[in-house]
Image: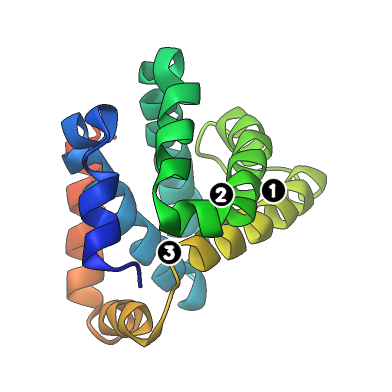
Amino acid sequence: MVSFSTWRAFYRIPWLRENREAVRILRDMFYVLVALYRADKLQEFSRLRYLYFKMIDSFAQYGRVGARDTVNRLLEIPWFRENRRDLYRLIAAYNRVVRNVLDTKGQIPSVSAQERINKDMDIFFHALKSLMHFDVRDEGRVNKLLQNREILDEMLDSFHQTLGY
């Protein structure tokens, strides 16, 4: 898990500070996506995956003008500078995934499209997990969701309501 001091530096970047709630929602959605995948709830996973990348895409579009500056400012933080390879892998995988996932419009894609998405999603999730140092505390959050399906369902409903889907 990323240290508190790293998060504090992360939120000193104006665009990220202004969008703190969106970052929190995306983090929570990530845990739910991992739980849905592990629970083999593929239809819910596919729908949430679409919302997740739709939200990231609109978030990225909103910040596109300052994207280079935001990445440069992230790289000024020692944690991100030390893990810049994962950051770049994450950005590259995101660009591939978002293109394919958003084309599905939240529906289950064809077999060939799903194979491409799975490959890119695997790279994206591994890079994200590596970048955030996914650890036992993160596993605990996912396991809590898996053990309490009511919380998982409530979070899913909350995401759909919040994002208007």
What residue is shown at x 43% (from left), y 12% (from top)?
65
User: In the drawing, what numbered circle is on residue 2?
Assistant: none
Determine crowd level at label 2: few under 14, some 14-19, many 20+ residues with C-alpha closer than 10 A: many
- Please, what is the three-letter code of the amino acid marked with disc 1? Ile
Of 103 and 125, the residue lying toward us: 125
Name, please, the residue furthest toward the right.
112
Q: Is residue 54 left or right of residue 86?
A: left
- Please, what is the three-letter code of the amino acid marked with disc 3? Met
Which residue in the structure is indicated by mark 2?
Answer: 87
Tell me which corner region of the image, top left, top right, bottom left or bottom right, holds residue 76: top left
Location of the C terminus by quadrant is top left
What residue is shown at x 62% (from left), y 45% (from top)?
88
Query: In the displayed structure, would residue 27 be above or below residue 32?
Result: above
User: In the drawing, what numbered circle is on residue 117?
Assistant: 1
- Please, what is the three-letter code of the amino acid marked with disc 2? Leu
What residue is shown at x 44% (from left), y 24% (from top)?
69
Q: Position of residue 31 (x, y in %)?
A: 36, 65
Tell me which corner region of the image, top left, top right, bottom left or bottom right, holds residue 156: bottom left
Q: Is residue 23 visible?
A: yes
Distance from label 1 to label 2 (Cα)? Answer: 19 Å
User: In the drawing, what numbered circle is on residue 132?
Assistant: 3
Coloring scheme used: rainbow
Distance from label 2 to label 3 (Cα)? Answer: 10 Å
Q: Is residue 105 left or right of residue 149?
A: right
**Regarding mark 1 in the picture, which secondary structure is present there?**
helix
**Regarding mark 3 in the picture, which secondary structure is present there?**
loop
Q: Nearer the viewer, mark 3 or mark 1?
A: 3
Q: Is residue 75 left or right of residue 21?
A: right
Q: Is residue 61 visible?
A: no
Q: Is residue 83 left or right of residue 45?
A: right
Earlier in the chain: of badge 2 and badge 3, it is: 2
Query: In the displayed structure, would residue 149 be above or below residue 71?
Result: below
